[in-house]
Image (cartoon, rainbow, N blue to C red):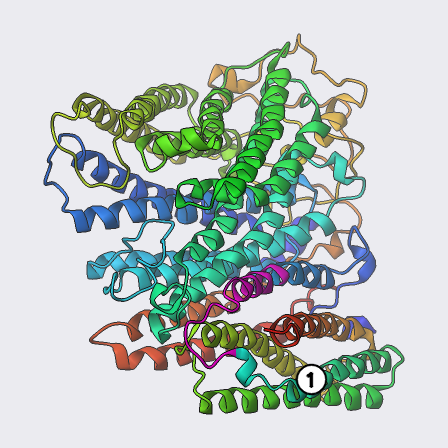
Amino acid sequence: MVESALKLERARYERSALVEWLTTVDHKKIGILYFWTSIVFLLIAGFLALLIRTQLIVPGNTFLGPETYNQVFTMHGTMMVFFVGMPLNAAFFNFFVPLMIGARDVAFPRLNAFSYWAFLLGSLLMLSGFLFGAAPDGGWFGYANLTSSRLYSPGLNIDFWVMGLQVLGVASLASALNFFVTIVNMRAPGMSLMRMPVFVWMTLITAILILLAFPSLTVGLFMIMFDRYFGTNFFNPAAGGDPVIWQHLFWIFGHPEVYILILPPMGMISEILPTFSRKPLFGYTFVVFAGMGIAFLSFGVWAHHMFAVGMGPVPNAVFATTTMLIAIPTGVKIFNWLGTLWGGSIRMTTALLFAAAFISMFTIGGISGVMHASVPIDYWQTDSYFVVAHFHYVLFGGLVFAVLAATYYWFPKMFGRMLDERLGKLHFVLTLIGFNLTFFPMHFLGIDGMPRRIYTYSAGMGWDVWNLVISIGGYLTALSFLVFLYNVVRAFQRPADAPADPWDGRTLEWAIPSPPPAYNFDVVPVVRGRDAFWIEKYGAEQVVGPTAEPHGPASGGSPQRSHNPNPGQHAGHGQGAPSGHGGQAHIHLPPPSWFPLATAIGLTLMGTGMVMHASDTLGSLGFPVVGLGIAVVVVSLLGWTFEPIHEQAHA
Amino acid sequence: MSSTTVGHAPEAHATTTGISHNKMMMWAFLASDCMFFGSLIWVYMAYRGRSIQGPYPHEILNIPFTSVSAAVLLLSSLAMVLALHGIQHGNMRRFRVWLGATAALGALFLGGQYFEFTEFYHHGLSLQQNLFGTTFFVLTGFHGTHVGIGIIWLVTLILLSLFGRLTPANAERVEIAGLYWHFVDIVWIVIFTLVYLIPY
């Protein structure tokens, strides 16, 4: 009955596949769009990293000139943070947060679609700088007054950067508002805050961080824009302006941004480790409150990026202290993950391997991070490859490893197909070796004084061998991603036969088929405790899984067996097609809409017009295009407001 | 009765907290907007008194004039409260009159800002002239933009009510617009104090 009601509803909105994807407001489809888009951007930004490593493979190389090198390293950094890290996290927020809290969608489905389209179009706007040989070249941090004055950055490079980032900022804020409201307001009955999966908790904290940190970047970018376009004096020393103000604005955003990137991966790890240890997360409450502690402290540490600027001993001492403090909640989490593994009946799946590697790699990055907190040591390390090593251990060893773990873990739920475990383990081994070969020697180079952001170096500095090793490591890492892509292609050549619960999971997303139906849950689940699905399967008293239970299909690499360890199945948690239940008349899917895409196009037109205004050839068209963009936004928002969204409610 | 209406009026009891999604989002947005104005105001304060050429603030700020326009904006908050009271008690006439008054007082404030900006410009203060011009126009300009967006919102609500698309059943939509409006007023109290009232 549910199916037939949905068929009716679907027929009503029957559209071609392309139109379907352009107008979808389904959080799962939007999550999949985020996923593939950021994987493509990951490959592009990874390719840029290979260009960097090819340039640096021997001293005095002329493979990339200095101008190109500046564009390549700037776009590598900017893309990895804004086009890859945040949207990859967003892919999993979108797909899994509503499932994990037992909701049928996010609070604002159309706003969600808008976030994706603004992210995509803003990214393309910035990337299009490459087409004009004018990709951003001021570093991802874009320090003023190099970036704020047309004397020092005369091309369009920085204009692409500022306008692209402003569009991406709007996308991030919209998404953060949406997930904040969704998590606070759309939990299934019984899903109290302290019963939420840790991934949901970290998503909530991340949303709050985005809401509070991004405005500072937005304001800073407006100031750079006004300085470049209207001749204001924000960062103009000749008029008394202070370029260090930009550094404060940027890092008040920039340091919380680090936790915006890493808290969701911490949440993913906190889901994956318990599943494959068959134990609940050790010290759930500690992990949650440590996440809050990190988020709170993250607003008080920004100036440790600026020790060498010359703020004076008192600010340096204060920020050194807060930076050391933030290591405490981070350390708490690491011990909690170790405690989760301790004594568990561990299944060595690819997801678990990546998750375990996350703990150790992230710890290395964390330890070198605490080293930077000491001001005298930071004076030595700042602007050297030691810092490059540090943040790659946090962002690659942390974020990328966790996202790969999450990909192997959740791929069956997203696409209904298992990834091959043998290829996955090959992928893992290659990535682990390639990653460490690439980034560990950078510590040595940094201690030896090799500076960051310089396109070449002279022979005879003692840096030749390690640079060669690092470049080889970089190619190996790239190879490991080819294995991953091959694995994905192989998965899509097989039929979609993944069971609903391949890993014997603990959270609600495993209670429904893989991939989930459009309406997620045929009956909204009632949550009776933490690890809600586990309790439904095994009862509340059976906290630790039956160790005698044969391992799940994943460890054998064969996903064929229909896995249903669910003797006391709770009504409404059926794994197959939903049978008739009362109340299906209330299942209502929001209709697709063109307005999110149109609004995002208008917003991007505004940015594009501003870039055009700064160009020599199209300058006169610039402001008309901005006006057109504003008009498109206004008309789309009006259409958005008047579009009926509740007409199906009583079908 | 709410089933006949269109738009964002989910039943309040359907959410976990009992607060509607829209109101919750507005509160979260205002928290974010606090940081937006916080950053702007912080930059203004950091550059306070650091202009290296005139005109300087004490030569040009007209405190009595701006006090009146600040009072106008604060009065608009009173009108907003009365408009909300009107629609919550089903008195659409009173709602429209007071919401119209709110928008008009907001427009009067913007007119005052326009007069002030042109006056300053004739006295030689431009965006480019000095740090005071740069930070003053950008800070108060962003606030004025917020007021402008608020006026468009209020006028849209009045038009909706005239076409019968806004009824007492959706009084919460007015309440949410009011949250935004009051917030913008409070921001002005902060700006007025820091920019105008503290002696230079």
Q: Residue at x 70, y 28 (%)?
A: A286
Mark 1: secondary structure: helix
Q: Is the residue A575 above or below the residue B154 in the image?
A: above
Q: Is the residue A487 above or below the residue A583 in the image?
A: above
Q: Nearer the viewer, residue A30 or A326?
A: A326
Residue A361, x across and y down, in percent: 45, 23
Q: Nearer the viewer, residue A206 or A147?
A: A147
Q: Is the residue A615 above or below the residue A568 in the image?
A: below
Q: Which residues are magenta?
A: B34-56
Is A494 situated left or right of A467 in this image? right
Residue B57, x across and y down, in percent: 54, 78
Amino acid type of disc 1? Ser
Q: Is residue B45 within the magenta segment?
A: yes
Is A524 situated left or right of A635 in this image? right
Name, please, the residue furthest toward the right. B89
Q: Chain of mark 1?
A: B
Q: Is the residue A241 above or below the residue B98 in the image?
A: above
Q: Residue at x 58, y 86 (%)?
A: B113
Picture quarter with the C terminus of chain A: bottom right
Q: Nearer the viewer, residue A97 or B68?
A: B68
Residue A180, x across and y down, in percent: 65, 51
Residue A389 visible within the image: yes
Which residue is labeled 1 in the image? Answer: B67
Q: Residues within 10 Å of mark 1 (few under 14, many from 20)?
A: some
Residue B63, x across and y down, in percent: 64, 84
Q: Is residue B55 within the magenta segment?
A: yes
